[in-house]
Amino acid sequence: MCQVMPADCRITTIEKYEKRIPTARKNFQRAGEEGRITLLEGDADGILKKLEGEVFDLVFMDGAKGQYLHWLPLLLRLMPVGGVLISDNVLQEGDIVESRFAVERRNRTIHSRMRRYLHTLKHTEELETAVIPIGDGVAISTRIK
């Protein structure tokens, strides 16, 4: 991302899984971009609630799928009009288009939460959203209000 964005842009990322943090930092350093990438360590829920005065023009959300709906309002308050939210893995290997009862029992909770998330994205007045069925699915939402 750093290689294709303007020199004055910065990336902020959140990582909860402790074993990934040192690897991420090494990768930032190897790419020569540690000065433009800020890694926030901890749970996204707590971190997003504490962020004040930050503005994010682009958000790539790829975390605990069951939390997407909970994080949406926290992210919207940090995004300006014209900001873009990319939500990864929203089609859950195609399971989202299946009936709840066609999905394995262990996946039903995440299935219903992701369906509610997609419904919310499509019906939130501040957003214009498109769902792209590539891989596990990507939703691209632009803040219009």
Image (cartoon, helix red, strand yellow):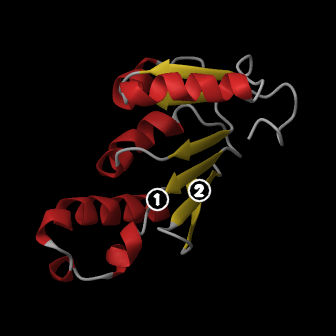
Give the residue at x 15% y 80%: 101
Task: Please give the label number shown on residue 141.
Answer: 2
Side (left or right) of 68 relative to 129: left
Q: Secondary structure at mark 2?
A: strand
Determine whether 68 is above or below 77 in the image: below
The disc, 1 or 2, on the residue closer to the chain's N-terminal end is: 1
Query: Which residue is more in the foreground, 121 or 59?
Result: 59
Q: Label 1 neighbourhood size at 10 Å, few (<14), some (14-19), many (20+)? A: many
Observer able to see residue 55? no
Side (left or right) of 83 relative to 101: right
Q: Secondary structure at mark 1?
A: helix
Side (left or right) of 7 relative to 23: right
Give the residue at x 37% y 58%: 117
Residue under circle 1?
121
Measured from the top left, where is residue 64 in percent x and y?
34, 45
Type of amino acid under label 1: Leu
Distance from Cα at disc 1 to Cα at disc 2: 7 Å
Query: Which residue is more in the foreground, 22 or 11?
Result: 22
Measured from the top left, where is residue 104 in percent x and y?
17, 73
Determine whether 117 is above or below 43 in the image: below
Type of amino acid under label 2: Ser
Figure quadrant of residue 3: top right
Observer able to see residue 51? yes
Determine whether 105 is above or below 113 in the image: below
Task: Please give the label number shown on residue 13.
Answer: none
Q: Are marks 1 and 2 in contact (CB under 8 Å)?
A: yes
Measured from the top left, where is residue 37 in percent x and y?
67, 24
